[in-house]
Amino acid sequence: MSWYLYVSHFLGGVFLANAIPHVVNGISGRSFPTLLASPPGEGLSSPMVNVLYGAFNLTIGYVLVYHVGEFSIRRIPDVLVVGAGGLLLAILLSRVLESFQRGR
């Protein structure tokens, strides 16, 4: 697999992981920070905005994983690259959101 396919799949994992908190908070009726809030990344967006933002992230992640190159759930390197992107974002978000919660 070419290097740019690894990058695409890694970023796809990032977008897929980022969709989770937005969709969950939106469906739960809770406000949650998005880049669309004011100030970006610090203010809270409405539940509807979070559902739409999460759907956008799901769409981009899906396209990057399944429509750029060939992704197979049976190939361990493919799964590891997508998982690494998701795990890295999850760790970064946990640190950022922890400080966000403390500041409130």
Image: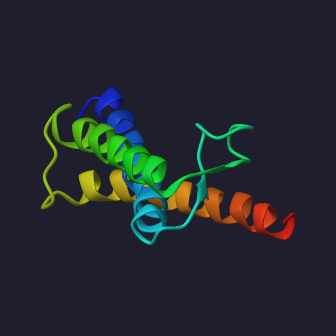
Q: How is the image coloured?
A: rainbow
Residue at 16% of width from left, 34% of height from top?
Answer: 67
Q: Quadrant of residue 101?
A: bottom right
Q: Position of residue 73 (x, y in %)?
A: 15, 59
100 or 14: which is nearer to us? 100
Can residue 14 be seen in the rendering of this structure? Answer: no
Q: Is residue 27 above or below residue 55?
A: below
Residue at 84% of width from left, 66% of height from top?
Answer: 104
Residue at 64% of width from left, 41% of height from top?
Answer: 37
Q: Is residue 95 above or below residue 34?
A: below
Can residue 74 be seen in the rendering of this structure? Answer: yes
> In which quadrant is the N terminus drawn?
top left
Q: Position of residue 84 (x, y in %)?
A: 44, 56
Residue at 34% of width from left, 38% of height from top?
Answer: 6
Left or right placement of residue 62 versus residue 44 in this view: left
Left or right placement of residue 56 versus residue 34 in this view: left
Q: Position of residue 65 (x, y in %)?
A: 25, 42
94 or 23: which is nearer to us? 23
Q: How many marks overall?
A: 0
Q: Position of residue 15 (x, y in %)?
A: 41, 46
Left or right placement of residue 11 versus residue 100 in this view: left
